[in-house]
Image (cartoon, rainbow, N blue to C red):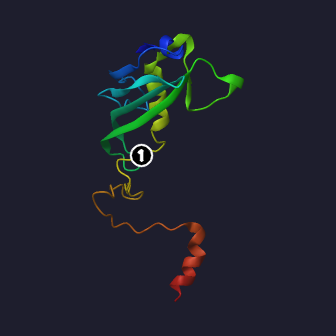
Amino acid sequence: MKIDLTNLLNGGGDAVSVDCSFDFSDFVYGVYNPIQNGVFVKGSVYEKAGIVYLDAKVSFEFFGVCDRCADDFKKEYSFDLLRILVQELANDSDSDDYIVVKNGTLDLDELIKEEIELFLPAKILCRDDCKGICPTCGKNLNYEKCTCKKQTDPRMAALLQLLDED
């Protein structure tokens, strides 16, 4: 979706309402496509005191595989997006708060895709307290306990022998 912001960038015009959904089923995160039901964006682009703002809320469902226990899961994510839109940046400054809008047109699809990539954590977990799987027997420790003897670091063997002598 491309939004013409020429009037707003030139200091006039009414706010532009944004209420749309994007099909990001081709979005690849890791090795799979986690966004199956689309991404919803609701907000507006407006000018205030000569500055043009994009203020929106982005929400989507993430269908993934836990990096710790390998369970499939679905998680709802949402984040607020507030950026200043400019036609150019002075002195080649690079800031995450500014978005350069070339030719007065904002490509919302690409912007939202980039923001989702930046928002998602590097390690995807089914839940914050995921216990993972046992490295010995392979049981999912979120659902059952394993009876495996705890592995010790071979570098600590000499110290463990001292404890065993007591």
26 vs 81: above or below: above
Q: Which sits in the foreground, 40 or 155?
A: 40
The image position of residue 105, as x and y in percent, is 49, 13
The image position of residue 49, as x and y in percent, is 53, 25
Q: In the rendered view of the protein, which quadrant contains the N terminus?
A: top left
Q: Is residue 113 found left or right of 139 in the rendered image?
A: right
Query: Residue drawn at (61%, 32%), measured in percent from left and top?
Result: 95
Q: Quadrant of residue 153?
A: bottom right
Is any atom of residue 139 visible in this view?
yes
Identity, as a three-letter code, of the amino acid under mark 1:
Asp
Q: Which sits in the foreground, 146 or 62?
A: 62
For label 1, the SS is loop
**Residue matched to label 1:** 67
Is any atom of residue 30 visible in this view?
no
30 vs 9: above or below: below
The image position of residue 142, as x and y in percent, is 31, 57
